[in-house]
Image (cartoon, helix red, strand yellow):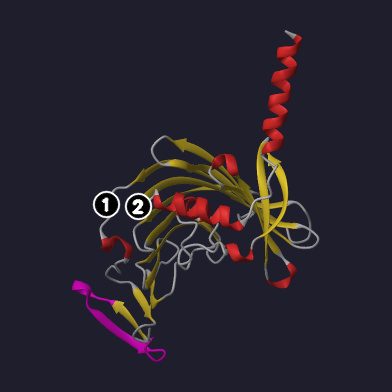
């Protein structure tokens, strides 16, 4: 009995150490992420976000709920919406906000609406090379999981990744890579080979402190593999190591492979929206029947 226990212990230790036996290379990550991306031709996420920050009337921490939806289509297309109440310093109260951003592979459209924009919704229309929210922590874990190799949707430049060390998060063996950023800061990525090389943590660090941290938990689907189940984003105060804000997001549902109409990835400007159109170089209001009512010109039309 003792020998069996000793053998079992040895096998466990060998298994744990073997996770760190070989130093990973970028080629391994590239292949794993390419394989993963191919499993998600389309995917839709519906999430609930609980955001806690010091933005309130008395300066005390307050928590507000938001709904986040993200749709990823074919050929670098994306639709992202975030909706809920948040503190408005200008109005000194909580106001409903709705944010919509789409990218159809060529055109980026953004719409701000809700009670915070009392006069009218505000829209922007421009030719773009990629999704303008690709560094937005509200959606990053979903992009990391389903579009890690799509540079139009997310910034994960593997040619800039430098292997630092092996480490563990909650007992899970991880490889730590670093990406140097301007100003002497860096992104550090904890990548779990046991979770299909998923990013389980990213920290933005300076030479003296951690600025920001994102921790991601995953669930495993028998058909598609690993998908994010929840994540926590923490921002630290600039003058200390204390937490300044915390956002916890939970995935309510995810749907993989459902056909998505192409017009979903080009936001529609509703009647009354004031649009800054960089393609035309004009500002206009959307009138009845979708007619553009010119307000003025602000620049030369944007070219491809």
Question: Where, by quadrant of the figure, is residue 120 drawn?
Answer: bottom left
Left or right, residue 145 beside residue 110 = right
Q: Which residues are magenta?
A: 286-302
| Disc 1 from disc 2: Cα separation | 7 Å
Q: Nearer the viewer, residue 252 or 219?
A: 219
Disc 2 marks which residue? 42
229 to the left or right of 172: left
The single residue placed furthest to the top in the displayed view is 1
**32 or 84, which lies in front?**
32
Q: Are marks 1 and 2 in contact (CB under 8 Å)?
A: yes
Q: Which residue is mark 1?
A: 259
Q: How many marks?
A: 2
Does the image show residue 70?
yes
Seen in the image, is 156 located left or right of residue 44?
right
Above-or-below relation of 56 to 168: below
Which residue appears at 36% of the width and 73% of the height? 107
Q: Position of residue 286 (x, y in %)?
A: 28, 75
Q: Is residue 290 above or below residue 57?
A: below
Which quadrant of the structure image shows residue 163? bottom right
């Amino acid at each position: 009995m003792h020998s069996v226990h000793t053998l079992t212990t040895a096998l466990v230790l060998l298994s744990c150490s073997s996770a760190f036996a070989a130093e990973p290379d970028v080629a391994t990550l590239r292949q794993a992420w390419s394989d993963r991306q191919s499993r998600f031709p389309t995917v839709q996420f519906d999430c609930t976000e609980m955001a806690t920050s010091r933005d309130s009337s008395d300066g005390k921490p307050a928590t507000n709920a938001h709904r986040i939806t993200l749709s990823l289509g074919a050929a670098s297309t994306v639709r992202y919406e975030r909706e809920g109440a948040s503190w408005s310093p200008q109005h000194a109260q909580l106001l409903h906000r709705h944010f919509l951003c789409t990218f159809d592979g060529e055109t980026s459209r953004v719409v701000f609406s809700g009670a915070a924009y009392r006069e009218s919704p505000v829209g922007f229309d421009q030719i773009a090379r990629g999704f303008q929210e690709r560094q937005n922590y509200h959606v990053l874990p979903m992009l990391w999981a389903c579009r890690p190799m799509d540079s139009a949707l997310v910034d994960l430049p593997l040619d800039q990744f430098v292997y630092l060390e092996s480490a563990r998060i909650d007992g899970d063996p991880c490889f730590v890579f670093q990406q140097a950023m301007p100003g002497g800061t860096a992104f550090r990525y904890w990548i779990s080979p046991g979770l299909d090389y998923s990013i389980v943590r990213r920290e933005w660090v300076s030479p003296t402190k951690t600025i920001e941290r994102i921790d991601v938990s995953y669930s495993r689907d028998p058909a598609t593999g690993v998908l994010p189940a929840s994540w926590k984003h923490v921002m630290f105060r600039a003058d200390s190591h204390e937490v300044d804000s915390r956002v916890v997001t939970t995935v309510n549902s995810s749907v993989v492979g459902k056909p998505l109409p192409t017009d979903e990835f080009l936001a529609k400007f509703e009647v009354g929206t004031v649009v800054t159109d960089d393609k035309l170089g004009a500002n206009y209001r959307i009138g009845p029947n979708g007619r553009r009512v010119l307000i003025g010109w602000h620049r030369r039309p944007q070219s491809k």
